[in-house]
Image: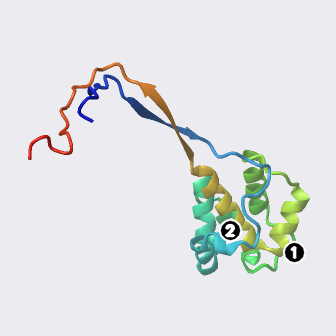
């Protein structure tokens, strides 16, 4: 060990990280199913306990007028006993599908709102929440730094003196 000269390292490789934020990648499908309440219990509970307030919050999160759901004709849509599909809810669901490029049709929207009114609103709220969250990828690469390092003296083992 004593006969080998110690070499100093002048340049060390240093990992350099770079964060890249991208918008959510869309798959042309809803991010969750109509009855996937367990995906976000907060959304489901809010819709269960106060559907009109929940609708107003969802519409506001989407960037529309807060009072838009209150323009729904009659309160029959809230109980699920409407004779036709509620027009404001239909427009909202179609707008969510259009903005996020989700496959579907007005007929699908009408059926979802007629048979599963509150669950359909929960699905829209989960999709809006999911689309608002950015996806962050962290990439790393090794780069050679040109700054010289200061050589350090290391003790030699075993000690040469006893």
- Image coordinates for residue 15, horizontal then vertical, percent: 43, 34
| Left or right of residue 36: residue 143 | left
User: Which of labels 2 and 1 is toward the front?
Assistant: 2
Vertical placement of 17 versus 51: above or below?
above
| Left or right of residue 15: residue 30 | right
Q: Residues within 10 Å of mark 1 (few under 14, many from 20)?
A: few
- Give the CA distance from mark 2 to mark 1: 21 Å
Q: Quadrant of residue 105?
A: bottom right
Taking depth in this image into account, of 126 and 61 the one nearest to the observer is 126
Considering the image in quadrants, where does the N terminus appear?
top left
**Sequence-earlier tag: 2 or 1:** 1
- Image coordinates for residue 26, horizontal then vertical, percent: 73, 47
Give the label on residue 28, or none.
none
Secondary structure of residue under mark 1: loop
At x 59% / y 80%, what residue is drawn? 49
Secondary structure of residue under mark 2: helix
At x 88% / y 61%, what residue is drawn? 108
Total labels: the figure holds 2
């Amino acid at each position: 060990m004593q006969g080998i000269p110690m070499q100093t390292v002048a340049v060390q490789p240093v990992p350099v990280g770079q964060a890249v934020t991208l918008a959510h990648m869309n798959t042309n499908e809803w991010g969750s199913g109509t009855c996937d309440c367990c995906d976000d219990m907060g959304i489901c509970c809010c819709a269960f306990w106060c559907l009109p307030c929940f609708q107003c919050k969802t519409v506001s999160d989407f960037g529309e007028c807060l009072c838009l759901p209150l323009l729904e004709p009659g309160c029959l849509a809230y109980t699920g006993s409407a004779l036709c599909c509620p027009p404001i809810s239909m427009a909202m669901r179609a707008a969510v599908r259009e903005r996020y490029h989700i496959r579907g049709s007005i007929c699908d929207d009408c059926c979802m709102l007629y048979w599963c009114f509150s669950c359909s609103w929960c699905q829209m709220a989960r999709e809006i929440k999911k689309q608002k969250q950015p996806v962050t990828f962290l990439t790393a690469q090794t780069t050679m730094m040109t700054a010289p390092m200061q050589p350090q003296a290391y003790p030699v083992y075993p000690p040469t003196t006893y």
